[in-house]
Every structure is written in C-alpha cells, then in structure tokens.
Image (cartoon, rainbow, N blue to C red):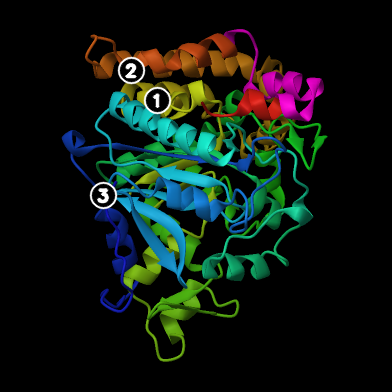
Amino acid sequence: MSTEAKSPELSPEIRGLDDLEAHFHAGSKPRPAWRVGVEYETPAVGAGTGDALPYEGTGACIRAILEEMAVDGWLPIHESDRVIALRKGDASITLEPGGQVEMSGRQCESMHEAHDEFIDHCARLASVARRLSVAFLGLGATPLTPLEKLPWMPKQRYRIMREIMRSTGSMGHRMMQQTATVQGNFDYESEEDARRKLRVSLALSPVLVAISANSPVLDGKETGFKSFRAHVWTDTDPRRCGLLPFAFETRGIFRAYAEYALDVPMYFVAREGQLLSPEGMTFRDYLAKGLANHRATLADWATHLTTLFPESRLKTYIEVRSADGQPQDRVIAIPALLKGILYENDCLDAIWDLLGRWTLSERIETAAAAAKDGLSARVGRHSLQSYARDVVAIAAEGLRRQHCLDGQGQDETRYLGRLEADVTGGICPADQALQAWRNSPKSLVSFASYR
C-alpha cells in the first residue's frame, strides 16, 4: 500500500478540490507493483477468566503485552510516556480502544507471504500468552466483559472519538471497545480500476458478513446475531458508515468520494503532537476557513480519510472492512478470497454479474439479514449460502489464474480450503463459537484462543 503523509506541519497546503482528487490518483500503481496488506484484530483477555485486560496494572495487562512483544526489531511507539504501539518497517502492532491487539501487516506480494507473516505473529502471541496467562481470541467481539466494564486505551485520539460518539448513535462505544475484524488492503491501477474494485467490494459486503460472522456472544450473553459486530455498525454514525450509494452510480469515483468525505465532520486536527478539536466542523468548512490559524494540508486530508468507516473505503488503496475477526485457521482466507476477485478482471466482472442487480434497499436489507442469520439469510428466493458458494468459486478461479506458487508448488487457493468447506456446509464461525459457549464461557475462551 502507499505511504501517506505523516507530518501535518510539513505537508503541502491544499489549494482546492483538484488536490484532494490528486491524492487518490497518487495511489495508482501498475499491476506488477500491486501488493496485499492484511490487518487482523484480536480481543485480549485473561486466560482463566475471559475478562478484558486493563491497559496497565499489577497483573496481566495490555502494556505488558506490548512490552513483551517489543523484541526482534519491533520498536515501541509512545504517547505521554506510555507505549501504545510497535512498529517494524511498514508493519505495526497497535491497540484498538478496548485493548484489542491489531496487527497491520507489511505490503505482501502474495498470500503466501501474508500467511508466513501471520504465522510468525501467532507464534509471538502464543509466547506472550504463555508468559502472561492471557488469551488472544479469534472472534469478532470481546465476548464476556460487559461494555461498562471494558477498559479505554490511553490514546488522545480515542478520548476525542469517545466523546463524539456519545451523540452519533447508540453503539459507537461498542464498536470501539468490543469489536474486532479482519481487513484486506488492495491497490488499483487507475481511477476506473478503483471504481470497479470499490463497487464490487461494497456489493460483496453482505456475503462477506455472512461467511465471516463470528460475534454471537456479547456482554456474556447470546445476542441473537451471528455477527453482532456487523449489527453494531448500523447505529454508530450514519454520516461516516455504510454502503456508499454513490459508488454504485458514478464513474468519477475520486471526485465523488472526495465530495462525500468533505461533508463528514472531522474528529480532530493534529498539530505539534496535539489534537485540536474542530467542534463539529466538516472538512469542507476547514478547507474554507481553517482552524485556529491552521490551514488544511494533505496530511490532514489523509488523516481525515482514516476516520471514515464505510464497508470499503478509499485512501491511496482500497480497504475492505466487512469481515468479523476470524478463527486462527481462517484469518488469511478472507483477504485471499478478495485477492482472487479484485486482482482478476474477469472475476471482478463475474461478481458484478452476480451481485450488481441488487437495489440499494436490497443491499441494506441483505446486510442486516446476514448479520442476524449468517449464510441462512435470504435474498428473495435464494439463501446467501448459494451466493457465497458462487463467490468462493469465482475467487478460487481468480487465484488459480494468478498462479502464485509457494515453495511446495501450491497456489493461493490453499487458503480457501476451510472457508470453502464451511460455506458448502452452510456453516459460519459463529455456529461453532455458539457450540463452545453453550458448554461454558471458559469453553468459548479456550476454543477461540490463538495457539
């Protein structure tokens, strides 16, 4: 993925809308330069209790986890003398607001490389888990700790978001503190290529929710949803979440996305290590008026784009965000499926032929049904399982055509094995998580723990 500006003070000032579009154009890459980035979040809990961990304390805590992982070239990043992240090259280990540990992987040439990176990360997690008596869960939400007892990580960004989300929906704090996801990041060659990939990944959203659904337990109770994580997004902040209707209608996707982002209220403006409150100002307002003698820069724009949360979002690459956190042996399956589709033109067309005729209301209704019922949700006369079977088959064909082989001569379809079997059997991870939960809460923690 492209490296975006980091320092607002040194970044060029924005002169107009053309600069905002140019930011997206700068992400365009020729096909040989395309890479895949994988991000995966894991709730961290006490191994014996299943309780979410505080940032710091006398026992197992998030700070101790980061300090234990700061080896082998992983450098700690501090905020107010507290370690809040680790970085190694273009990979990072960061914290979500409730202490979920997120690995954002490096730019990988193949899913084999991404898989090797994931295996290495799992080994580090397992070592830390043994030493600190903690567990890292392959689930889409922290299952046992009630919302009111969940911790907040000590990041200024999260303190600001916490206050704003009190007024934007009823489940913003749940989204921040409880949910976990697997995301894939993908390059594009041109604006037209970005348009096709964005609309297809958005069209795929209900199917991705159904096949990845893995958050049926929250606050120590069954929720009645296979993916409560997906349901949470329906009442978090409608201005910055959802399916982006314009992406299905427009050809000039860079201008359309810029216009959308301009009218979303800002969370903050970063200057000299501090986050300034824009007090509800949209980026369009900021561009026109400035804030406290500061003018809008391209780094401000890049930061603002990270505060939009549609199912797929555009930065200098496309980030697909619809999947729950996954069991350990299915984490790489979701980005592998997406690579098979998004990096093969015929497969992009095949998915659009399959899903492109749905109306916006059908997409929204189907996404809601997928969150509740997983693969058994229906679209008219058909179950989502039938669509999911076709999606997996198309993705597998794309990976075969891409013909990226590992050292044993296997192509990337090897990462779809369990996913394909589960879809054929009408199973999503939530079904197995519920079986473990109904045995006992401790059984769920043991079942879902990374090893």
Q: Measuring 55% from the left and 52% from the top, which residue is drawn there?
A: 62
Task: State the image coordinates of residue 259 (x, y, percent, origin top left).
Answer: 46, 63
Segment tinted magenta in the rendering: 424-443
Task: State the image coordinates of residue 438 (x, y, percent, origin top left).
Answer: 81, 22
Q: For numbered disc 2, what is the local secondary structure?
A: helix
The answer to whether 238 appears left or right of 326 in the picture is right
The answer to whether 352 appears left or right of 154 in the picture is left
Above or below 406: residue 222: below
The answer to whether 225 appears left or right of 6 in the picture is right
Q: Amino acid under label 2?
A: Glu
On the question of residue 379 being in view, the answer is no
Q: Tell me which corner region of the image, top left, top right, bottom left or bottom right, holds residue 35.
A: top left
Q: Amino acid under label 3?
A: Gly
N-term-proximal mark, 3 vs 2: 3
Residue 439 among magenta residues: yes
Q: Tell me which corner region of the image, top left, top right, bottom left or bottom right, holds residue 279.
A: bottom right
Q: Are marks 2 and 1 in contact (CB under 8 Å)?
A: yes
N-term-proximal mark, 1 vs 3: 3
Q: Disc 1 versus disc 3: distance between alpha carbons?
A: 23 Å
Q: Amino acid under label 1?
A: Ala
Q: Which residue is mark 1?
A: 336
On the question of residue 281 being in view, the answer is yes
Q: Which residue is mark 3?
A: 89
Above or below 197: residue 7: below
Q: Which residue is mark 2?
A: 412
Magenta-drawn stretch, dominant element (helix, strand or loop): helix
Query: Of 195 and 24, which appears nearest the observer?
Result: 24
Above or below 90: residue 306: below
Above or below 126: residue 165: below
Q: For numbered disc 3, what is the local secondary structure?
A: loop
Name the disc covering residue 373, or none: none
